[in-house]
């Protein structure tokens, strides 16, 4: 696709380019109607706006098939052909290292409960206003966390993934950056990652600020520029504002349910909700320091009381008008995670009509999507652009 221009501060502001492409397989060449984007080192090398659209982002890797946020999951997402890998959700250790876990509480994603030496670490904390019981990364040194192994987070929906329980350790962000370079060399094309700062206000209060640590590592590995292959994201706008002053990477503000408030807003007494942020004024504010939004799919197409998709909102058009890209989350193949009108039966482990759901979401004009099943997403994209 056509790369976009950016303003003098390196912030993307140009209008969105429409994709006219035919995708030939998960890893094949992409032949555009207005040009040619090849599956080689140039794809994505011109910055985030040169990524293929709709961009397929491997959500926590290929978490539909492997325990999330492991090198097994990240590697499989790349092997499947994902354009970008969400590696990873960043949380700190007691001694200040950044590791990749969906949440700081690791009772559900590691075998920590099976380690009697850590039994006394189990505790209850208030995490963004919610009482949470378990084991927390900030109570462990990196060396201690490295003795743990990852397990499947949702075994009731993905029993086959439990085959891999205990196989992989918890990766650090620095290891991910090295892995990215290694895979880029091996594959002959730029590998992109999409890390998220998790609960940054919570960790800053503990003296474990995330943004400075992220920026330091990005600078160390030469990945802090506007065209660097690292997109940063957070549910807390102030985290992206802080990173906007530290690095030039593309930044994305994640948006949860319309009635929710980002936790940093709660802490700061900012009354705005997500519903306010998705209005033109809110999007213009986000565009003053970020390049994109990552809305929940329900903000793109709401569901009715029965869980069926209704009419798309104006969010896609409004965000594009503000110069923002949209990477909604999260597409999963299993029935419980799909809109009701795309489910097949009631088996919580069975796949529904994921292709139908992808087609409906892609038709709204979104710029990409987070998916636990990159292979399905890539086939759905091929159907869409060839349709």
Image (cartoon, rainbow, N blue to C red):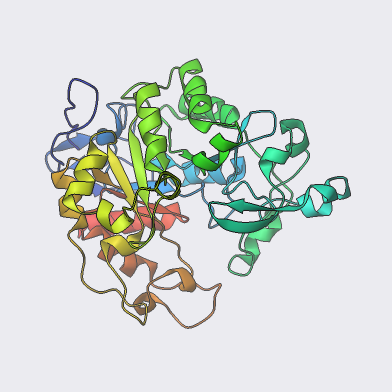
In this image, 121 relative to 340: left or right?
Answer: right
| Viewer-closest of 68 and 139 | 139
Q: Position of residue 125 (x, y in %)?
A: 66, 52
Residue 129, picture quadrant: bottom right
Q: Which of the pair 138/311 is nearer the observer?
A: 138
Residue 155 visible in rendering: yes
Q: Judge from the rendering whether residue 123 lies leftward or rightward of residue 98; answer left or right.
A: right
- The residue shown at (52%, 73%) is 350
Q: Which quarter of the image is occupied by the N terminus? A: top left
Could you tell whether 126 is left or right of 44 in the image?
A: right
Query: Against 128, is 307 above or below?
Result: below
Q: Position of residue 309 (x, y in %)?
A: 29, 73
Query: Looking at the rendering, which quadrant does residue 82 occupy?
Result: top left
Residue 229 visible in the picture: no
Residue sitting at 83 percent across and 46 percent down?
Answer: 118
Q: Residue at the far front: name it.
A: 269
Say if 101 sits above or below 310 in the image: above
| Up-down relation of residue 340 to residue 88 (above or below) | below
Q: Quadrant of residue 362?
A: bottom left
The x and y percentages for residue 11 are 24, 28
Q: Position of residue 52 (x, y in %)?
A: 28, 41
Pick the quarter of the image with the C terminus: bottom left
> In the image as oriented, which residue stretches furthest toward the right?
116
Q: Residue at x 35, y 21 (%)?
A: 225
């Amino acid at each position: 696709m056509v790369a976009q221009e950016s303003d003098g501060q390196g912030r993307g502001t140009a209008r969105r380019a429409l994709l006219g492409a035919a995708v030939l397989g998960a890893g094949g060449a992409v032949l555009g109607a207005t040009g040619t984007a090849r599956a080689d080192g140039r794809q994505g090398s011109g910055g985030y706006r040169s990524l293929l659209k709709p961009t397929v982002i491997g959500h926590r890797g290929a978490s539909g098939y492997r325990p999330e946020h492991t090198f097994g999951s990240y590697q499989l997402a790349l092997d499947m052909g994902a354009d970008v890998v969400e590696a990873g959700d960043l949380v700190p250790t007691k001694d200040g290292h950044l590791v990749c876990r969906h949440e700081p509480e690791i009772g559900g994603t590691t075998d920590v409960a099976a380690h009697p030496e850590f039994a006394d670490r189990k505790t209850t904390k208030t995490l963004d206003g919610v009482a949470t019981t378990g084991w927390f990364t900030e109570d462990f040194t990196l060396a201690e966390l490295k003795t743990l192994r990852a397990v499947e987070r949702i075994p009731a929906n993905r029993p086959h993934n439990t085959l891999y329980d205990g196989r992989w350790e918890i990766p650090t962000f620095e290891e991910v950056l090295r892995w990215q370079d290694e895979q880029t060399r091996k594959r002959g094309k730029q590998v992109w990652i999409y890390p998220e700062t998790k609960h940054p206000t919570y960790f800053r209060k503990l003296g474990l600020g995330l943004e400075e640590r992220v920026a330091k590592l990005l600078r160390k590995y030469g990945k802090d520029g506007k065209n660097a292959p690292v997109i940063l994201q957070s549910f807390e706008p102030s985290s992206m504002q802080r990173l906007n002053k530290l690095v030039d990477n593309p930044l994305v503000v994640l948006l949860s349910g319309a009635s929710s408030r980002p936790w940093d807003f709660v802490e700061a007494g900012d009354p705005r909700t997500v519903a306010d942020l998705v209005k033109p004024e809110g999007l213009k504010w986000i565009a003053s320091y970020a390049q994109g939004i990552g809305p929940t799919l329900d903000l793109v197409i709401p569901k009715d009381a029965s869980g069926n998709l209704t009419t798309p909102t104006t969010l896609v058009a409004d965000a594009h008008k503000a110069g923002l890209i949209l990477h909604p989350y999260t597409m999963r193949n299993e029935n419980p995670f799909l809109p009701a009108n795309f489910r097949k039966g009631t088996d919580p482990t069975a796949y529904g009509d994921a292709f139908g759901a992808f087609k409906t979401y892609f038709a709204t004009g979104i710029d990409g999507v987070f998916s636990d099943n990159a292979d399905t997403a890539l086939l759905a994209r091929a159907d869409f652009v060839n349709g």
